[in-house]
Amino acid sequence: MYLRGKMNVPADYEDRLRLCRRRREKARRGASGGQYYATHRECRLAYQKANRARSRIADRQYYASRRMVVFSLYGGACVCCGISDHVVLELDHINNDGSGSRNAHEHYRDALLYQPARYQILCANCNRRKMLLRRRSRRLPWGHYRDIQDPRERRSVQDRKYREGRDYRLRERLYNLYGDRCNKCGCPDSEVLELDHVRNDGGGSRRPSSRATRRAAARSRDPHTFQILCRNCNQRKEKERRARACMGAT
């Protein structure tokens, strides 16, 4: 091994590179024009299409192993309720500085450095409660919009308050139709309850927004199509569905 720039490469790296170049040149001379590259590109795309499901399963297994390492590093249980089911555990930013353009995999990679002052482990229910508490702390009082001088900003605050009240009334209507607690564990906390598709058919006919889905559930009133689950039970159900899909793909 020797250092080439900032990367350690094998000692025979240059020899391998020249050999690959000679092979590509020889294959290019044997084929007519760009036929060699076009043919191999089609073969590569066909291979990727045929093994797309298998590669997706391999990626999920890799990231699942990384998540398990992170969970074991930070205690392996929710710091609020103590639940240790890794299916419902999530990585939480203590200072709420996780928003941005980065995805969850990069956050798990940074958490491997063990930063207990920045990261902690929460279950899905406790993470939802923390998020709602943070939103309520930033929410303005109901009559605060009267003190706003800018008419556009005052109108936007009024519209937001109206939408919040409309969504609250819609959720109350759904709780009256489908029950005010989780159908699996019986959790009565309305902050962590979610609307779930019983047959797992919400992805194929996905609606523009969750509000439209709630309206469709309120119109349907069919307990065999929709049900109420907490976030923990909803994640467990999704994990079981993905496991069955992986078994079918393999």
Image: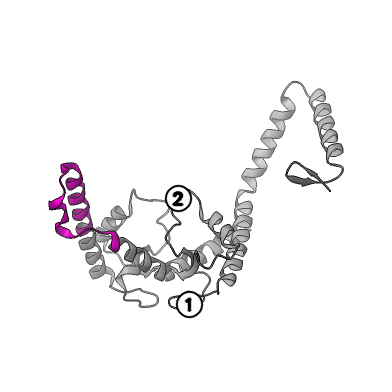
Residue 22 appears in the figure: yes
Q: Which residues are magenta?
A: 137-165
In the picture provided, is 31 more to the left or to the right than 96? right
In the picture provided, is 152 more to the left or to the right than 20? left
What's the CA distance linking mark 1 and mark 2?
28 Å
Is residue 141 found inside the magenta-colored segment of the image? yes
- Looking at the image, the residue that sits furthest to the left is 146
Q: Residue at x 55, y 54 (%)?
A: 106
Number of numbered discs? 2
Counting residues from the start of the chain, the first of labels 1 and 2 encountered is 1
Q: Amino acid at mark 2?
A: Gly
Q: Label 2: state its secondary structure.
A: loop
Residue 16 or 23: which is nearer the viewer?
A: 16
Q: Residue at x 33, y 51 (%)?
A: 209
Looking at the rendered image, the disc whose residue lies closer to the viewer, 1 or 2, is 2
Residue 227: where, in percent of width, then height? 34, 67
Residue 103 or 141: which is nearer the viewer?
A: 141
**What's the colour scheme?**
one colour
> Which label sits on residue 100?
2
Q: Residue at x 34, y 63 (%)?
A: 134
Q: Amino acid at mark 1?
A: Ile
In the picture provided, is 242 more to the left or to the right than 250? left
Is residue 31 found inside the magenta-colored segment of the image? no
Mark 2 crowdedness (10 Å alpha carbons): few <14, some 14-19, many ≥20: few
Give the answer, above or below, for where 62 lies relative to 231. above
Mark 1 crowdedness (10 Å alpha carbons): few <14, some 14-19, many ≥20: some
Residue 132: where, in percent of width, then height? 33, 64
What residue is shown with label 1? 83
Most prominent secondary structure in the magenta stretch?
A: helix
Image quarter of the C terminus: bottom right
The answer to which image quadrant residue 151 occupies is: top left
Residue 228 appears in the figure: no
